[in-house]
Image (spheres, rainbow, N blue to C red):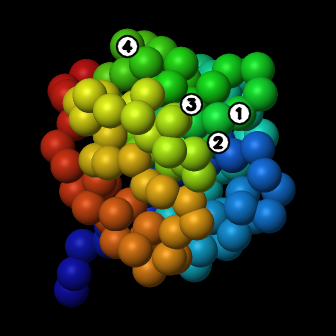
């Protein structure tokens, strides 16, 4: 009998309702436990409350943007893997050089199968020990 594997806990920070809903549904159907928030400030609250395996964050958001969120998450929660996404070329350039934080920066619009493959690849990366 195969060992049961616990689903990954994923925090999605995305300010666009339709994209946030799409990500929540797709990641849930892929077997993950998903929490969604509208921006980086709300994400920081959730990170303090619960353990997550992955932060999937938009870069451009109100209040606390994704880059600030990624930097704070990497510092305060070093075992959380980080994956960023953006629809803006200038934001992707801002994230250049932050490869230590994320597998890559996903461009929007994205193909859902590609996004899911990237999420799975990031979840397979080793994390720092507690």
Q: Nearer the viewer, mark 1 or mark 2?
A: 1
Q: Nearer the viewer, mark 1 or mark 4?
A: 1
Any part of residue 119 in sight: yes
Q: Are marks 2 and 3 in contact (CB under 8 Å)?
A: yes
Residue 61: which disc?
A: 1
Q: Nearer the viewer, mark 4 or mark 3?
A: 3
Which type of secondary structure does the marked residue at label 4 adopt? helix
Which type of secondary structure does the marked residue at label 3 adopt? helix
Q: Are marks 1 and 2 in contact (CB under 8 Å)?
A: yes
Q: Which comes before the other along the chain, label 2 or label 3?
A: 2
Give the percent coordinates (x, y) of residue 15: 76, 44
Q: Which comes before the other along the chain, label 2 or label 4?
A: 2
49 to the left or right of 122? right
Label 1: few (<14), some (14–19) or many (≥20) C-alpha neighbours in 10 Å: some
Q: CA distance from mark 4 to mark 3?
A: 14 Å
Residue 13: which disc?
A: 2
Any part of residue 30 in sight: no
Q: Which residue is mark 3?
A: 66
Q: Which comes before the other along the chain, label 1 or label 2?
A: 2
Q: Are marks 1 and 3 in contact (CB under 8 Å)?
A: yes
Q: In the picture, residue 118 is in which quadrant?
A: bottom left
Residue that lies at the very extreme toward the right in this rendered image: 17
Label 4: few (<14), some (14–19) or many (≥20) C-alpha neighbours in 10 Å: few
Give the percent coordinates (x, y) of residue 11: 57, 45
Q: Which residue is mark 4?
A: 75
């Amino acid at each position: 009998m195969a060992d049961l594997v616990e689903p990954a806990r994923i925090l999605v920070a995305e300010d666009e309702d339709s994209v946030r809903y799409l990500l929540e549904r797709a990641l849930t159907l892929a077997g993950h436990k998903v929490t969604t928030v509208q921006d980086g400030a709300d994400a920081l609250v959730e990170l303090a409350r619960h353990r997550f395996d992955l932060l999937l964050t938009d870069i451009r958001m109100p209040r606390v943007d994704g880059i600030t969120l990624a930097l704070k998450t990497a510092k305060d929660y070093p075992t959380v893997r980080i994956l960023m996404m953006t629809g803006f070329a200038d934001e992707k350039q801002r994230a250049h050089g932050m490869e230590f934080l994320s597998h890559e920066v996903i461009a929007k619009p994205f193909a859902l199968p590609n996004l899911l493959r990237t999420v799975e690849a990031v979840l397979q990366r080793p994390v720092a020990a507690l």
